[in-house]
Image (cartoon, rainbow, N blue to C red):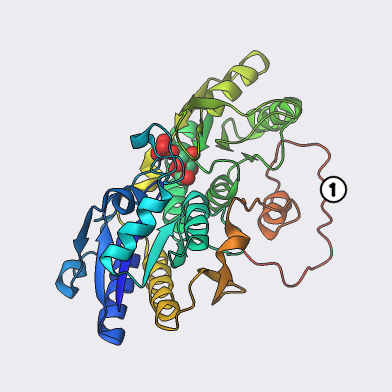
């Protein structure tokens, strides 16, 4: 058996842990030959790859980034290297020439969408869900999210001490694209006073009210805002647009926008921190190492069973798989009635809305964290 591995889209802590688990498991269990494509789908298009033997994937469990490199613009159906042409037939031919039985694609929704389209052309894929954003459909967790939340929570803790010393309003802008998972989890973990997420467009009057209340009582305020958050009836803040990317819009800047909106209404000084790519760098947490390892081993077992066209997923805390088709081109948003939103409301955190109708007196069983 000969299997390729690639890492696509933005990097994320835990990628190397997955590469290691997939390769070691396939080598030990199936005596497979494993190769790694360089820089995501670019490696499949340009036939750039390296052999992955057991020793090549040893000692990488804890390392951040990806030993294979990645690319977030290499789409075989619209290849920037060929003036936007569809070069997917070239990918099919390359895989035939390499004698590949299948490819394990580790990535987010963009990667799963391309894998699904190539699968329909005869290249066989197993997907592994990666992204710090935790926004892939049909899986409760993506690896990398726990690490990003840990980093963002540490930032909240640090902003708290400096904010308290100066009596300031401290705004932390987190990543997460169109979903508020990182902001919500880090905000709850850090005990933020205000958490703003894209799924609940905020009323500035409500944020002002929460800050003023804090000004009176505690003299400082911590606001965590997801990069995709927006005012009610308003737009998301776009940092830049990258024309030939499968994910052309880069969000970012809402932290500073919010500071300007708050300034005329508050006595306190306001400071904004944009956490950025720090959330994606460095070593994965123990949880992400464990999740990545188990995702990788499960992906290898799907390959061994020739269950291609599926992505590894976590459902009710257990490993399972879901068809790539169900994941492609979709985003998993924070449900407004989720446990974490309820947790924030229950401890008095403002979500920037006066009209959140969440009943908290009845215990609700079965909601997952
Ligand atoms: O999808 C992961 C992510 O880090 C998002 O949270 C963020 O919006 C985006 O990637 C940033 O992309 P880039 O690395 O291209 O700036």
Q: Quadrant of residue 199?
A: top right
Q: Is 148 left, or right, of 335 in this rendering?
A: left
Residue drawn at (53%, 54%) of the image: 134
Determine whether the residue tagged by mark 1 lies in a helix, strand or loop.
Answer: loop
Which is nearer the eye, 365 or 88?
88
Identify the residue at the far bottom of this view.
Answer: 29
Q: Is 256 left, or right, of 326 in this rendering?
A: left
Position of the N terminus, as image quadrant, is: bottom left
Residue 50 at x, y percent in the picture:
19, 60
Residue drawn at (71%, 46%) of the image: 348
Residue 209 at x, y percent in the picture:
73, 29
Position of the C terminus, as image quadrant, is: bottom right
User: How many numbered marks have been drawn onto this rendered protein structure?
Assistant: 1
What crowding class fits label 1: few (fewer than 14 Cα within 10 Å), some (14-19), or many (20 or more)? few
Which is nearer the eye, 124 or 186?
124
Which is nearer the eye, 45 or 106?
45
- Which quadrant of the render holds ligand 1? top left
Q: Is 91 left, or right, of 208 in this rendering?
A: left
Q: Is residue 156 visible?
A: no
Q: Quadrant of residue 292?
A: bottom left
Which is nearer the eye, 181 or 347?
181
Q: For ligand 1, tell me if the residue under mark 1 lies within 8 Å.
A: no
Residue drawn at (83%, 61%) of the image: 361
Residue drawn at (69%, 60%) of the image: 339
Residue 148 at x, y percent in the picture:
44, 51
Give the labeled residue for mark 1. 357
State whether residue 335 is above or below residue 84: below
Q: Is 83 left, or right, of 256 in this rendering?
A: left
Residue 356 at x, y percent in the picture:
81, 44
């Amino acid at each position: 058996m000969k299997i390729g591995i690639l890492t696509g889209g933005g990097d994320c802590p835990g990628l190397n842990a997955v590469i290691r688990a997939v390769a070691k498991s396939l080598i030990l269990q199936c005596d497979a030959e494993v190769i790694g494509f360089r820089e995501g789908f670019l490696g499949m298009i340009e036939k750039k790859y390296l052999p992955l033997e057991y020793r090549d994937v040893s000692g990488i469990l804890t390392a951040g980034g990806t030993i294979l490199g990645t690319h977030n613009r290499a789409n075989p159906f619209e290849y920037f290297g060929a003036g936007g042409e569809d070069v997917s037939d070239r990918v099919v031919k390359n895989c035939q020439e390499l004698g590949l039985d299948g490819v394990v694609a580790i990535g987010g929704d963009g990667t799963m969408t391309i894998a699904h389209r190539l699968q329909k052309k005869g290249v066989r894929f197993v997907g592994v869900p990666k992204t710090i954003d935790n926004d892939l459909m049909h899986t409760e967790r993506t690896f990398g999210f726990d690490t990003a939340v840990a980093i963002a929570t540490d930032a909240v803790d640090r902003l708290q001490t400096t904010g308290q010393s100066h009596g300031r309003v401290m705004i932390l802008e987190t990543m997460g694209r169109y979903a508020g998972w990182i902001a919500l989890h880090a905000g709850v973990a850090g005990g933020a006073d205000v958490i703003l997420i894209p799924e609940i467009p905020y009323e500035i009057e409500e944020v002002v009210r929460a800050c003023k209340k804090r000004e009176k009582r505690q003299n400082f305020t911590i606001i965590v805002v997801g990069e995709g958050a927006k005012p009610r009836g308003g737009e998301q803040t776009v940092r830049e647009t990258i024309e030939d990317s499968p994910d052309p819009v880069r969000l970012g800047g809402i932290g500073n926008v919010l500071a300007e909106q708050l300034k005329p209404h508050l006595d306190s000084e306001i400071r904004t921190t944009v956490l950025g790519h720090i959330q994606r760098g460095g070593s994965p947490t123990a949880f992400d190492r464990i999740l990545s390892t188990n995702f990788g081993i499960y992906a290898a077992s799907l390959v061994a069973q020739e269950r291609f066209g599926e992505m590894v997923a976590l459902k009710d805390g257990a490993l399972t798989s879901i068809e790539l088709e169900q994941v492609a081109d979709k985003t998993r948003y924070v449900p407004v009635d989720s446990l974490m939103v309820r947790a924030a409301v229950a401890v008095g955190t403002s979500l920037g809305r006066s009209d959140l109708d969440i009943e908290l007196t009845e215990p609700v069983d079965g909601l997952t964290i």
